[in-house]
Image: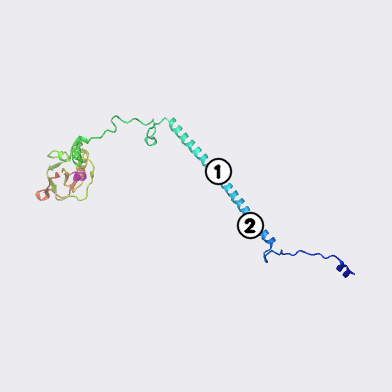
Amino acid sequence: SSLQNLESSPRVHHAPLLAPHTCVGMSPVRHHHTRGVAVLALRVTVLLASAARGAMAQDVAALGQALGQCRGELEGCFNAEATCRASCSRPTKSSDQVPGDHRAPPWPEGYGNLLRFPFDLSDMKALKDYARELWQPDGTAATLPDGRTERGFEKRAGMRCTSEMVSVHPVGGAGERWSKQLWAEAQDWCVGQANCSGIMLYVGKHTMNCHYWCARPQFCSGPIVGDADLEPSLEWNLFVRSA
């Protein structure tokens, strides 16, 4: 009877899974699902990019605000320092002043005019020689008088001894100025040495030689008793120690 009921029941016609015009292997459901995933991924990417731009804009704004605050604080420090310096009673150093500063002293009268050559001498060598002649408060070795000094040294103009103490210069130095004190110290040193027999002083006119020797006496170590112990010189004077 069951078989009869089945045979007598109305038949149900199912629609085919594939439409007649659909290509084999391309499911419409699967194709629609793929497009949805792609659109969703694109939307997520756009949303993430927008969020990143927004966060970056917020960071830039925050940095600009912090930089402006720092600049304001720094300007406040400069203003406070200027106020403190202005209220200080001591004079402002020249190195702290800027051009146009009202605290700067006025320029001296005639400042900026073209300077003239001293004594109208443009030749530097001639100027040095002239200045050397002018600035000699104690004279020079060449102006020492003839005869015997108070410490017992007799002058021999235009002479040197043949027994120079090489590299022995206990008094004076290169570039120093001749003085009475230097001459006294040279004589005292020689008197204090048992083997010192004389002092030689430079009296030449050569500028470079004078720089090294005008205030640096040389000393003799051997006996000075005859012409064999002397040698002529146009630039040196010898003072022989008395026995």
Q: Main secondary structure of the magenta part?
A: helix
The tag on residue 38 is 2
**Cα distance in 3D space between marks 2 and 1:** 35 Å
The residue at the point 56 percent across, 45 percent down is: 57
Q: Find the residue positioned furthest to the right.
A: 1
Determine if residue 71 is in view: yes
The residue at the point 86 percent across, 69 percent down is: 7
The residue at the point 51 percent across, 42 percent down is: 67
Quadrant where the N terminus is found in the figure: bottom right
Of labels 2 and 1, earlier in sequence is 2
In the rendered image, residue 157, in percent from the top left (x then y), is placed at 12, 43
Q: Nearer the viewer, residue 164 or 73?
A: 73
The tag on residue 61 is 1
Q: Nearer the viewer, residue 242 or 154?
A: 154
Circle 2 packing at 10 Å, graded few (<14), some (14-19), many (20+), is few
Determine if residue 190 is in view: no
Q: Are marks 2 and 1 in contact (CB under 8 Å)?
A: no
The amino acid on which the numbered mark 1 sits, given as a three-letter code, is Ala
**Label 1 SS:** helix
**Bounds of the magenta segment:** 207-212
The residue at the point 17 percent across, 40 percent down is: 141
**Label 2 SS:** helix
